[in-house]
Amino acid sequence: MENPNAEIAAQVVALLRCKGYTFATAESCTGGAIAGAITGIAGCSDVMLGGVVAYHNNIKNKVLGVSNSALCEYGAVSEAVVREMVTGVSQRFGASCAVATSGIAGPGGGTAEKPVGTVWVAVNVLGNVSAHLLQLGDSGREQNISRTVHQVLLLLKKRLEN
């Protein structure tokens, strides 16, 4: 299977390895595509611990420790939830770095408040969490997933370089 994000994934793996960091993922709308991009790189076992595809809110809550209050008050596609997802996966896996995604890849499922292509992502490097809102538009499910993977890896790469 071709990895459209292979170049940036290889750069992330190299940076993680160079710094002696480990990595984990908590993915909802990307369905494991970030983990897939990383594990498509030879030698990733030096850094990749694992990942959770937490598509259902019960998994976000029970496996990642996302609070019911955050899920109820803000919804799964929110800054609060991705921050809790990335913190939860980092703690459960003992990872020095992690990423999380939650969004509406499409083609359906959007609302006026959160249209298709709305994706929240979070990056955790050594306990320092940042969250970012992506507004990708309704450019198709596969395209939205691929663009989210690319943006998450780019954000992580920038954080690792600083």
Image (tube, rainbow, N blue to C red):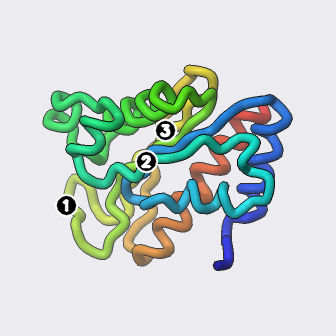
* Residue marked by disc 1: 111
Disc 3 to disc 2, how far (Cα)?
14 Å
Count of numbered circles in the view? 3
**Residue 132, relative to residue 142: is it above or below?**
above
Q: Amino acid at mark 2?
A: Val
Closer to the observer: label 3 or label 2?
Answer: 2
Q: Is residue 110 left or right of residue 4?
A: left
The image quadrant where one finds the N terminus is: bottom right
Tell me the SS state at disc 1. Answer: loop
Residue, disc 3:
122
Q: Residues within 10 Å of mark 2 (few under 14, many from 20)?
A: many
- The image shows residue 85 at horizontal and vertical percentages of 39, 36
Query: Residue at point 38% right, 63% down?
Result: 117
Q: Position of residue 4 (x, y in %)?
A: 67, 71
Q: Earlier in the sequence, mark 1 or mark 3?
A: 1
Q: CA distance from mark 2 to mark 1?
A: 26 Å
Is 53 left or right of 9, judged from the image as shown?
A: left
The percent coordinates of residue 8 (x first, y second) are 74, 57
Q: Nearer the viewer, residue 162 or 2?
A: 2
Distance CA(mark 1)–CA(mark 3): 22 Å
Residue annotated with mark 2: 52
Residues marked 1 and 3 touching at CB (< 8 Å): no
In the image, what residue occupies the spot 35% across and 35% down?
64
Q: Nearer the viewer, mark 1 or mark 3?
A: 3
Q: Residue at x 17, y 28 (%)?
A: 69
Observer-nearest of 107 and 63: 63
- Mark 2 secondary-structure assignment: strand
